[in-house]
Image: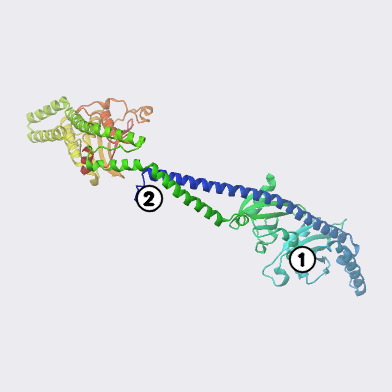
Amino acid sequence: MMMGELANLNKRSLFVKLFLVTLISIITVSLLSVAITIRMSENLFLKTFSITNEKLLGQVKSDLEAYNNAVATSATLIAQSGGVRKYLSSSETDSVSLSMQTYAMTQRIKTIITNLSAYDVGVTLVGANGRSYTTDPWYWSVTVDELNNHEITKQTKANPREILYQLYYDRDQPGTEQKPVLVASKALYEQYTGNIYGTLYITFRDQDFQSFYENFTSEGNDVLLMSSQGQIISSNRSELIGKHVPSLLHAVDTQEKSGLGSTSLSFEGSEMTVLSEYLPEFDFYLVNLLDRETAMGNMVNVKTITLMIMSVVLLSLIVVYLITRKMTKSMRGLVRHMSQIPTSGFNQRVDVSKSGYEVEELGNAFNYVLDELNVYVDRLVETQKEQRKAELAALQMQINPHFLYNTLASVKFLVQQGNKEKAAETINALITLLQNTVSNVQSAVTVRQELDTLKNYVFINHVRYGDRIRVNYFIEPESMDYQIPKLILQPFIENAFFHAFNHKEEGTILIMISVQDDHLVCEVNDNGDGMDIDSAETAEGKTLPKTKRNRKLFSGIGIQNVDHRLRFMYGDSYGVDISSVIGEGTRIKITIPLQKQEEQDEKSS
């Protein structure tokens, strides 16, 4: 029932507006409340989670520093061992001596690596003499030749005084090479000469290395170790190991420099909260990535929230409908009666005897308006008709008598000279010109009719003053049937004839009319003397240039009158635009909207 009544109501009715505004307000408040609550919960959760993870990262950092200390201690003891140095640098080939060296070196290594007993690592030594030693050949099955030519060894020898941590990972190789290994390498060299006699490699498989942080990871909460070059060294997400991630490196580096506790980053298509710790001993970043969506997904029950909002909206819909319907009942009755006025006439008064106070006042006011409207409309129609007739009559009757006198004098001269044919043409042109200006009661004519008027006017001027000023017409055929206010081009042609060529013997006037988009554009251009236009005055579009060209010789329709007339008819965006350069000429541009006869008749009526 309720939905049926709503469907029958006008969408713009007061009832619908009140109903929708109230309903939307309730929904908006509900959604905002839920959104704010969820947002506050997210911020609190992320803040608490960040604090907790910062402490966990600190714990992981401490464990890694302890591992580094064990590696550094072992590397120092191995570098100081004479037995190791002798085994890796001696060229002794005697089997007995070699066996003794090997035994002494092995025993010393076993003693030293007890420092690393807490970690499941492998130790490999490669000497400059080609000898090598490893604690477990199966832990890291890499040949001596491969090691000597590997980038890890090159970097180690380039930095002999440092312990370098680098990733050894080759997905294309069989065996253990397919598994990522963290390699701590140290060049062994003579203290006094600096000659490198061997290289130490302490290897830690990533699957074992993850024990440092695997207890702190979960779905959406990842930990990774990243080099200062942006390469992922270790991570609980194995697919990331070995990849270079410049965007993550930039985010972490920015966080470290700015001192921020955390930062945000779009990573692998997810929005992440990033926490990091720099490990100077490793030259690594310990990074914690928290996927916000995954982390918050378990905290927010979308189904429960959706059901709650739907329940609130449904309840609000029923309550608001009943209240609003009762409040607007009398108003809807008034609107229904008022909507029948256009078909039943202005004499149908509204009955407000059983309405509330507000509706009764509106009804009484409406009845009063109906009474006054009949009188006002009749009076207004008559007034406008008389005004339009008076304006048009005044406009058409402002033919300058000097123009008629001079034209008739020219005809007389032609007759006296015996040029009766041209005199007859001049008389015909004058008759047609007067018919189109004085006799024609229309305020607008077609471009075709206006063009005939202009040609007759130009012909008369050529008879009177000669052909030193040529007039060319460029009229787009499409524009011929469009309406144009009568006599809006004649004043500009008149001014061009009498003022544009005072310093030139001859010249040309171009008349161009075309359709551009939804506008009719008329231009009157001459290559005459030009004139000085006050740019400060005309830039604001308030007035046209003040010049003697505003003088009227043919009719009372001056340049200013044309501009005012166009602005009054079509608005301030239309009118006359004048540009001129002294010595080059003047350009007149008139822009009006496109209108045909039918549209003009509708507008006039």
- Neighbor class of circle 2 (other Cα within 10 Å; few <14, some 14-19, many 20+) is some
Mark 2 lies on a secondary structure that is helix
Name which residue lies at 16% across and 25% down: 402
The amino acid marked with disc number 2 is Leu
Q: Is residue 179 left or right of residue 360?
A: right
Q: Residue furthest bottom?
A: 95
Q: Can the viewer see residue 474? A: no
Q: Which residue is the site of mark 1?
A: 148
Q: Is residue 116 left or right of residue 389?
A: right
**Whole-percent x and y of residue 260?**
68, 46
> Which residue is the site of mark 2?
6
In this view, the residue in front, 429 or 390, is 390
> 568 or 211: nearer the eye?
211
Residue 248 image label: none
Report the amino acid beneath label 1: Asn
Q: Which quadrant holds residue 85?
A: bottom right
Vertical order, 490 against 67 (above or below): above
Q: CA distance from mark 2 to mark 1?
A: 85 Å
Give left or right: position of 324 versus 246.
left
Quadrant of the rendering where the C terminus is positioned: top left
- Nearest the eye: 176 or 382: 382
- Of the numbered discs 2 and 1, the one sitting upstream in the chain is 2
From where the camera sits, is residue 449 visible? yes
Which residue is at the front of the view, 576 or 426?
A: 576
Image vertical order of residue 237 relative to residue 397, above or below: below
Q: Are marks 2 and 1 in contact (CB under 8 Å)?
A: no
